[in-house]
Amino acid sequence: MTHAVTDRPSDAELIQTACRRVTGATLAVEGAETTPVNVVHLFESQAFVLVPTDGEAMTLADDSNGGLAAMVEVTDCAPIDLRERVRSLIWLNGHLHAVPANLERDLALEIVTEHPDDGLLDIGHGYSMLRLQIDSAVIATASGAASVSAPDLAGATPDPFWEYEGDWIAHLDADHADVIGQLARKLPRNLRDGRVRPLGLDRFGIRFRIEGPGGDSDVRMPFPRPVADVYELSQALRNLAGCPFMNSLPD
């Protein structure tokens, strides 16, 4: 079997990763005000979300037998202050179902083993869990919008560095102007006059936001091959910058 070679995560993987580190999310249900969402956990073609227990969405879900048409909107923001921090917007469309109260804590314990999120501690303390059976998903980034089917989303996994990416990006931005400067030399000449900031980091490469006088541009610099662990990631960054002996990531 021939496997396609890519230098970027798939749209389904981007959605999986963004939902692991939600910056902001809301739940929209017809007949209710938009509800803030505390946690979004994707499992197969389902999204388990935490919402206020006394909110309208909980009441409507409890009263529904066949599920409510609903949409979860997820905002993925850069971990540093940029002129425009939003990296992507995601919409999960499907049908919302109540989760029995006696199962919430058991589900939370299962979720936390692979998706540690302090928000899960709020179950039973003002927040409750709902389940969205996903029909489709859409992701919008600087390069455009794409639709992702429920089976494709279910078959994808988050980037292996999702839990640490924010700290690493902040570390590069604050403490490694030398690495950023070396990498900036590889940018197209017409982008080198802008302010170069790290935007994202994953197993396929690093992304930059160039804040120029005429607007912002996003550029991806791929690694020669996908990396599998922190050692390979640090080595790939150093080689990409042309500084093989420079420490790029914190221990």
Image (tube, rainbow, N blue to C red):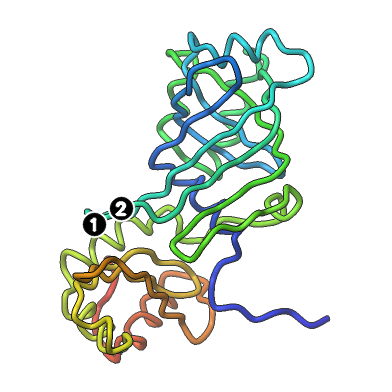
Q: Position of residue 157 (x, y in %)?
A: 62, 56
Q: Which residue is mark 2?
A: 85
Q: Quadrant of residue 230?
A: bottom left
- Residue 23 drawn at (x, y percent): 38, 42
Residue wearing tag 1: 82
Q: What SS does tag 1 mark?
A: loop
- Looking at the image, which residue is at 48% across and 66% down? 143
- Residue 193 sits above or below residue 100 on the image: below
Q: Residue at x 51, y 45 (%)?
A: 19
Tag 1 and tag 2, C-beta contact below 8 Å: yes
Residue 197 located left or right of residue 73: left
* Mark linked to residue 17: none
Q: Amino acid at mark 1?
A: Leu
Is the residue marked by circle 2 packed among few (<14), some (14-19), or many (20+) residues within 10 Å? some
Q: State the SS at label 2.
A: loop
The three-letter code of the residue at mark 2 reads: Arg
Q: Nearer the viewer, residue 66 or 16?
A: 66
Q: Position of residue 218 (x, y in %)?
A: 37, 70
Category of crowding for the residue at label 1, using alpha-carbon neighbours closer than 10 angstroms: few (below 14), some (14–19), many (at least 20): some
| Name of the residue lying farthest toward the front | 214
Quadrant showing the C terminus: bottom left
